[in-house]
Image (spheres, grey):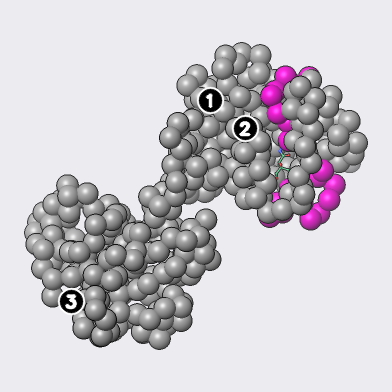
Amino acid sequence: MLSGKNILIGITGGIAAYKICELIRMYKRNNANVRVICTPNALNFVTKLTLQNLSQNNVGIEEYEINDFKPEHISYADEADIMIIAPASANTISKIANGICDNLLTSTVCAFKKPIIIAPAMNCNMWENPIVQENIKKLSTLGYKILEPESGFLACGYEGNGRLCQIDKIFDETSAILLPRNEVKKKYIITAGGTIEDIDPVRYISNYSSGKMGTAIADEAFYNGNDVVLITTKDIKRPYKIIKVKSAQEMQQAIENEFENANVIIMAAAVADYRVKTKSEQKIKKTNEDTITLELIKNPDILQELCKKRTHQTIVGFCAESENLIENAKEKIQKKGCDYLIANDISRKDIGFSSDYNEVTILHKNGGIKQLEKASKQEIAKAILKEINE
Ligand code: PMT
């Protein structure tokens, strides 16, 4: 995702410095070029060797280390597309807010003209100190992106606000800033995951959908610069709007609430066709009978109903088939009335449900058919969005 992007990380002296090792790995896994600058105090918490190995680059600490025609802090500032200061100590925050340049990190910040993300981490009393708060406010007003610390148990033994925010959040924020945005934003509603239909307080009917396919499409739509609402049965965190639902009826309601100003709806969720007619309020007891019968009632067909009431929206359905894939898909696209139907064979273990891979056929309402080779769900998501936007 971050291929060709140059990310500069500034680490200051704080126990959360060790978490930045994983952040560097996340950036590297996404093909970014990572450089690291540490304040001398940061090296009390992580080693230069670790950071060098993870970033696959030299780590900058003191000024005047390299005999180059360009002062080192200027080279760092010129090369990077974004700078992330994490963990940012009260000391470094206050220096930056006051234009102090007394080490390589603070001097680089002063010369940096591109986006800067600051993720503070410190003792809760330090965080609440009015001087620190004043400095944070000042930096925020000046356009620095502040990722506020979280509340919880702190390494110093206190309980309170001061813990470094989740590194996923720093990664998502970086991606949101760096990745290209569409000039014309569209609003996408995407569904993911298998719906859960309660039988009683302890049992339910569901299916093997992990939500990976729908989430990959939502990620792709978001990183292309669109407004995204992901309606999912799964617990996930993303830098776009997530609505967590459980049953088919809840999913339908959530879609209806978002539908009017949406441009594209993609139904990748595996929605239960039936739910139990009457959910038992109490746990159903075992009886002496060998069999019991659950009476099921049809769920609304969300996709079909959306297609009936659409005005301008592009509507894309998925279809999960265990046999006669194309034949059933052709019948389904007619019946549901969507613009595109993405057919996948769920009898195979290497694709479809829960797998990181898929192999799909895209059917168009006019009869066009396009077969996509087996690929990661991210690649499939890219290809689907390209197809429906052409
Ligand atoms: O989540 P993963 O583990 O990544 O797996 C991905 C997937 C296999 C679940 C996904 O690629 C997929 O095929 N999703 C659709 C599954 C499904 O419900 O297929 P269907 O053929 O039963 O339904 C056809 C379409 O109608 C689907 O878009 C479905 O969301 C929709 N539907 C179905 C029933 C219903 N009551 N309301 C609906 O809107």
* Residue 310 x, y percent position in the rendering: 60, 16
- Find numbered disc 2 in the image and state the secondary structure of the residue it sits on: loop
Say which label, 1 or 3, has the lower sequence index. 3
Q: 127 or 112: which is nearer to us? A: 112
Q: Residue at x 77, y 49 (%)?
A: 373
Which residue position holds label 3?
A: 103
Instruction: Check disc 1: other Cα within 10 Å, few if <14, some if 14-19, many if 20+.
Output: some
Whole-number angstrom distance, CA of label 2 to CA of label 1: 14 Å
Nearest the eye: 70 or 172: 70
User: Residue 359 in the image: x percent, y percent?
Assistant: 77, 47
- The amino acid marked with disc number 1 is Asn
Q: Residue at 53% across / 25% down in the picture?
A: 263
Mark 2 or mark 3, which is nearer the start of the sequence?
3
Q: Quadrant of the C terminus?
A: top right
Secondary structure at badge 3 equals: loop
Q: Position of residue 188 (x, y in %)?
A: 53, 32
Mark 3 to mark 2: distance in Å?
51 Å
Of the two numbered discs 2 and 1 on the same chain, state the one appearing first in sequence: 1
Instruction: Name the residue type under label 2.
Output: Glu
Magenta residues, start to end: 335-356
Task: Report, in whole angstroms, how far the alpha carbon at label 1 lies from the one at label 3.
Answer: 50 Å
Q: Which residue is mark 1?
A: 263
Q: Say whether residue 233 is left or right of residue 345.
A: left
Please, what is the three-letter code of the amino acid marked with disc 3?
A: Asn
Of marks 2 and 1, the one in the foreground: 2
Q: Quadrant of residue 329?
A: top right
Ligand 1 located in image quadrant: top right
- Disc 2 target residue: 390
Residue 237 located left or right of residue 214: left
